[in-house]
Image: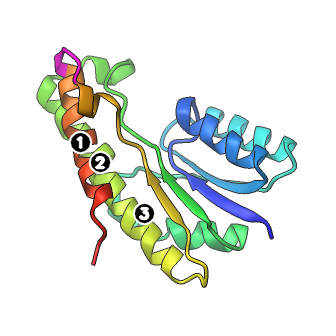
Amino acid sequence: MRRAALVTGASRGIGRAIAVAAARAGADVALTYRSNASGARDTEAHIRALGQKAITFQIDLADEAALASLGASARDALGRLDAWINNAGADILTGAGASMSDVQKMDLLMSVDLRGTILASWQAASVLAKQPDGGVIINMSWDHVLTGMPGTNPQLFAAVKGGVLAFSRIARQ
């Protein structure tokens, strides 16, 4: 049986590596991106070159309405979803994010990394629960949540990713 995974934030970095690893393991992959269309196309092409199906969705995880149809669209395109990996996160270290105030960075991280992960997890749970054999949701936290790291940006990441960790440890009833 073919397996399928959805990976958010798969146009570069860790998300791209996860999506490609899933394809190498034999899974078809749905991937999302917010603004890096070129990177998403490259990731999709790489997955297809490995002989797997790939489909790309442009989405902002902070947009609840956009998330509402993501799961069903990915499942319909791939025939099923076995894994939903919430990897996407806001970039506050480079580009426009680097020049934001600390409060703006905090708001962006809360909106995308924490709220977006929670909304995406709820969407994933709804889709996976409708499948006879369910599936798995993987939420990306951060190792420094437990160990700490100096600086304001790490402080913000730890607070938000600590929320992701706490959320992920408690099953929704």
Q: How far separated are the C-alphas under marks 2 and 3?
A: 21 Å
Q: Position of residue 32 (x, y in %)?
A: 55, 49
Establish if 104 lies above or below 5.
Answer: above
Q: Which quarter of the figure is the N terminus placed in?
A: bottom right
The nearer-to-camera label among 3 and 1 is 1
Residue located beneath label 3 in the image:
67
Q: Is residue 36 visible?
A: yes
Mark 2 vs 3: CB contact within 8 A: no
Front-lying residue, 117 or 136: 136
The residue segment tinted magenta is: 148-152
Residue 103 falls left or right of residue 64: left
Q: How far separated are the C-alphas under marks 1 and 2?
A: 5 Å
Establish if 84 lies above or below 159.
Answer: below
Mark 3 vs 1: CB contact within 8 A: no
Q: Which quarter of the figure is the C terminus placed in?
A: bottom left
The nearer-to-camera label among 2 and 3 is 2
Q: Amino acid at mark 3?
A: Leu
Residue located beneath label 1 in the image:
162
Question: Is label 3 in a helix, a strand or a loop?
Answer: helix
Q: Amino acid at mark 2?
A: Leu
Question: Is label 1 in a helix, a strand or a loop?
Answer: helix
Residue located beneath label 2 in the image:
165
Instruction: Point out the tag, 2 or 3, that comes first from the N-terminus.
Output: 3
Q: Is residue 37 visible?
A: no
Q: Residue at x 74, y 57 (%)?
A: 28
